[in-house]
Image (tube, coloured by chain):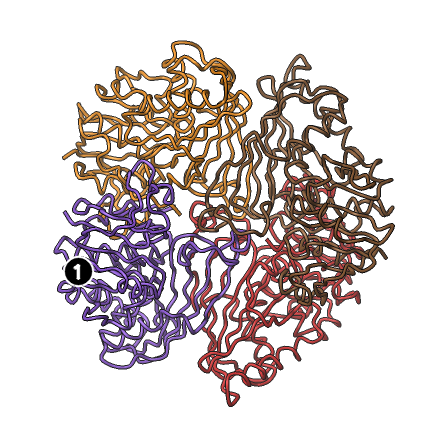
Chain colours: A brown, B purple, C red, D orange
Amino acid sequence: MIKAAIAGGTGYTAGELLRILLNHKDVTVTAVFSTSSAGKYVYSVHKDLLGDTDLKFTGEIGNPNVIFLCLGHGVSKEFLGKHKLPEKCKIIDLGNDFRLDSDFEGKHFTYGLTDVYLHEIEGSDYIANPGCFATAIQSGLAPIAKAGLLKDEIHVTAITGSTGAGKRLGETSHFSYRDNNISVYKPFTHQHLGEIRKTLRDISGEEPPQINFVPMRGDFARGIFASIYTKWNCCKNDEQALENARGLFNEFYKDSPFTFVSDDPISMKQVVNTNKVLLHLEIHQGYLHITSAIDNLVKGACGQAVENMNIIFGLDRTEGLKFKPSAF
Amino acid sequence: MIKAAIAGGTGYTAGELLRILLNHKDVTVTAVFSTSSAGKYVYSVHKDLLGDTDLKFTGEIGNPNVIFLCLGHGVSKEFLGKHKLPEKCKIIDLGNDFRLDSDFEGKHFTYGLTDVYLHEIEGSDYIANPGCFATAIQSGLAPIAKAGLLKDEIHVTAITGSTGAGKRLGETSHFSYRDNNISVYKPFTHQHLGEIRKTLRDISGEEPPQINFVPMRGDFARGIFASIYTKWNCCKNDEQALENARGLFNEFYKDSPFTFVSDDPISMKQVVNTNKVLLHLEIHQGYLHITSAIDNLVKGACGQAVENMNIIFGLDRTEGLKFKPSAF
Amino acid sequence: MIKAAIAGGTGYTAGELLRILLNHKDVTVTAVFSTSSAGKYVYSVHKDLLGDTDLKFTGEIGNPNVIFLCLGHGVSKEFLGKHKLPEKCKIIDLGNDFRLDSDFEGKHFTYGLTDVYLHEIEGSDYIANPGCFATAIQSGLAPIAKAGLLKDEIHVTAITGSTGAGKRLGETSHFSYRDNNISVYKPFTHQHLGEIRKTLRDISGEEPPQINFVPMRGDFARGIFASIYTKWNCCKNDEQALENARGLFNEFYKDSPFTFVSDDPISMKQVVNTNKVLLHLEIHQGYLHITSAIDNLVKGACGQAVENMNIIFGLDRTEGLKFKPSAF
Amino acid sequence: MIKAAIAGGTGYTAGELLRILLNHKDVTVTAVFSTSSAGKYVYSVHKDLLGDTDLKFTGEIGNPNVIFLCLGHGVSKEFLGKHKLPEKCKIIDLGNDFRLDSDFEGKHFTYGLTDVYLHEIEGSDYIANPGCFATAIQSGLAPIAKAGLLKDEIHVTAITGSTGAGKRLGETSHFSYRDNNISVYKPFTHQHLGEIRKTLRDISGEEPPQINFVPMRGDFARGIFASIYTKWNCCKNDEQALENARGLFNEFYKDSPFTFVSDDPISMKQVVNTNKVLLHLEIHQGYLHITSAIDNLVKGACGQAVENMNIIFGLDRTEGLKFKPSAF
């Protein structure tokens, strides 16, 4: 039994991790760390867990085999500075502290994009879990980078659910603002561009082209839907070009238990509440158009984090991650 | 031209009043009072007004003919204590300070439920504008009270949009919480019960029966939909009972330009972005079942406030209040 | 391994059953019966199942140990008339054909409300799975009926998600109509009243009082939220009355793995995508007010159907039913 | 008084036209033509109009000064073939029959994009009203085309509300599908590309560059939000480039009563239920990024249609088009 601790226990990702880990047959959650809420029932904050657990938040980390860091971006380093973890305790960081800066006080953090870095993850003790947008977008680009065909500018528009912005209240997370609304934020400058570029560079061995990324705030709570396109001049005609692209993608993901290429157009809800990535490819006017859908809290955060845990502890990669889709 | 000032200029009701008054042919908005935002463009807060006005928030009330108080509930008295208004300045309070306590420092506030108190309003200088739930529910009960037939307990469930809770951020106004969710709040104890009971007492001349009111938070931004029922034992059969009830309602509302009884079942969006009240009546198992729909920000607040202004200034009651419905 | 067939394979409940059964360790789905779609991949209709199964719809039922009937209400009898099932094949009907008329051609259908009829279900081969509204409402009333305290009229308003109306397209399931809208349908006459009254009669041994039930169409896809109240005159004061009511409910549900009484007010999303029933009790003005929340497709249909299967096959009642809540 | 008829009276655009025209001081609606619904009250179909009009659908066109064609795309020609209109009756077609093929049986249809073709419209009797996506996208590109700076590929992602697809029921307009969902349709091939290219060619006098347009289905009922970018290499630095772009846009729209350039980022709901176009410009990585928002039923259809009517009848362009925004 893996003893798991969660730091930053009251946030959205901590709640989602609990939803997953409480049903994971090889894990016992030994600590849900929160100094502010220590002593309170976990279900007093994550209210859907009423009836599922009598765990309380705690101010002690205890002696876990793995700790998940669900802290605000930038806070993980501070946390590791302050708290001495047990020797041999694995760390899976859901923030962005170690995605680019992968070395910290003698620890090397492997970037936990499971479909790309499976072998590196297997031997790792420390994981920098990928960002949600980053996971959706990289999943759509990795097979092309692998084939060395990522030569031209990349155009991405991706829409995220409100849970992506976390629990913090703000004008754009107010229901009266967001209901039936759409808006753009951080166009061309979103912080996930860094980790996307790094992965593509790693895979292809060369500097990736410019990525024009327009993120949008969607009026739904869960999910990310990305529309991606780049020049695709490989073939005599569109049919062959499509066959060629599908071939690359199917080959790249042939061993992935969670990533699938759909022949039919996809919609976001096909993957909500699952750990899947769903991709669809079309060829138009010399472009390969890729749509990519994930659940931002599952594959985009906690599901992939548990997948990483499964891998580093030598479990089946899908253990505890076969969720009933919500579908509607 | 009526010179109108708005106090509490940055809140939701102030914004909605501006949306109405800027198109009102007999009104000039002379001051949008907000100490915290003085000097900023009104459209910097009420962003849909970009292009419609170059007004700025101001720290001075000036010399208006009428002031609309869009302050938090309980703050209107404090405001009137602090600020000396021009003599003869009419006051329309959108808060709840004067709905039950109608006399304040020599001023008498008439309860501005236009379908019921039209004649009292005509001679008034000071108006306590009704609450949103109160307007929807009273509209469904006033004709029965008028006929002296409100004898038995009244059962009300009413669902409100998120704008009813104002601009303040809170857990239940977070999009991630409220999207696709429903919950109950303040069951049997909502503060609007006081004004509802007072009106019914006024109309019928007797103490109204118990009102069991369960308010709900809906996952939409605008609108109130109320389901109301009470015993209805008037007649030999359901058909006659329905005819009898419709007769009372049609008679009661025959001169109302905004309140209509629909023969067909109604849905809330039929009235969104209008100043209408829509009612539908059915008889079942000895009960008269009434559904009532309004837009909480229009008929439930600012539309009725301007209707009151029209009445006290001798304008046509519908002036500036014939809005294009949004319908969808 | 239990061999399970599903009749009516293309509808919403068939899809949800598949979402559950494909992950159930003791079940193999051997047939997804649909004459109209025979030969097509199941995921071509239930698109979220892409990657989870390569099953195809079939025109043959084969030789299952259990068949789930996911046919339109009223069609199950016709189906059983037309198709000869293997002897010993258990039947779980998700329609309403056998909820009131429990005997059909020598087969006795037990009403599958698991919290109430657990022991009857254990010895049954044929199950009439309860309706969704019926499950939410009965869960709120059964403990009172059991205590013989259901003496006074019962007032119920319950709001359902759009999936409750199935896949069929209609004016009220059009997104443009339903988005940000609320409406009432079948007030006082909903067809689930029959099964609710039958259960209450069974439990209490006496004719239940009148139930005034106003169903509403909510603008969300999954879930039912019910507000229920009835007179509660047991005790000296509200505090004791509440303690008394909570005592009855906690005793009634003490062995239930899925039904919980929350001390705090509840919201619908706490149970979405789970097999739970969540209840909350308050006392106001002589009434016991009960809120009850379920997922209409899970506890209100397919989750409870699988729970029934687990029970009749002697499995743990919760097998395959511990889902990750979607929460948001 | 302009006598106006509406053909195709039961559809969404006919309803929206009625919402506008019933409040237009210079218009009387003399016929709402629908053979299938002739004799029924208009409010029996457009239910929000209860209380606003006692018009009935009619099978006769009568003798209008203007007729609005709200027929399915492709049906307008058929309609004009079948029905003889009074001589001098103006025609405003809301379908796409005459947007590219502007000449039909001796009539020349002017493309009614008011901000671009104002002077041509003034002298016209026949108007081809622009498409909704086309209006949002052209509004973001016209000033650049005018300046002769549209040289490089154009990238557009635009999301539409469900009313854009009309009243017809279909899988993707089912609430259970669309609620909290996002999907792409007709990527790179949407039919509005034709009219967009034609306008840009007209304005700039040269063949426009390739336009890569990815349309999306949003989970809201009203509105279009477009994200557009193209290379912008004019200046020494981003600040000057932005100033330069804003200058072009402000100059282009300086006389427009409905189109505004916002210094702050915009969200779609700022324009819902108005006839406005709202634009926002940013410069990033050598690109000019433009966001554009309209209400698809108002500026994207009926509002612009009435604007065209105002112009051809010599009325103030804004007559009857100053709507209260819904904002929420």
Q: Chain of mark 1?
A: B
Residue B53's x, y, as percent? 28, 39
Residue A151's x, y, as percent? 67, 18
Residue D46's x, y, as percent? 32, 46
| Residue at 17% from the left image edge and 32% from the top image edge | D63
Q: Nearer the viewer, residue B91 or D298?
A: B91
Up-down relation of residue B321 to residue A201 (above or below): below
* Label 1: which secondary element: loop
C184 relative to A291 in the view: left or right: left
Instruction: Find residue B305 and report its image quarter.
Output: bottom left
Instruction: Find residue C182 and report its image quarter.
Output: bottom left
Count up the numbered dots: 1
| Residue at 26% from the left image edge and 30% from the top image edge | D307
Residue B79's x, y, as percent? 29, 61
B49 relative to D141 in the view: left or right: left
Up-down relation of residue B163 to residue C191 (above or below): above
Q: Quadrant of the N terminus of chain A?
A: bottom right
Q: Amino acid at mark 1?
A: Asp
D170 relative to B115 in the view: left or right: right
Q: Which residue is mark 1?
A: B255
A187 relative to A275 in the view: left or right: left
Q: Nearer the viewer, residue C160 or D323?
A: D323
Residue C42 appearing in the image: no
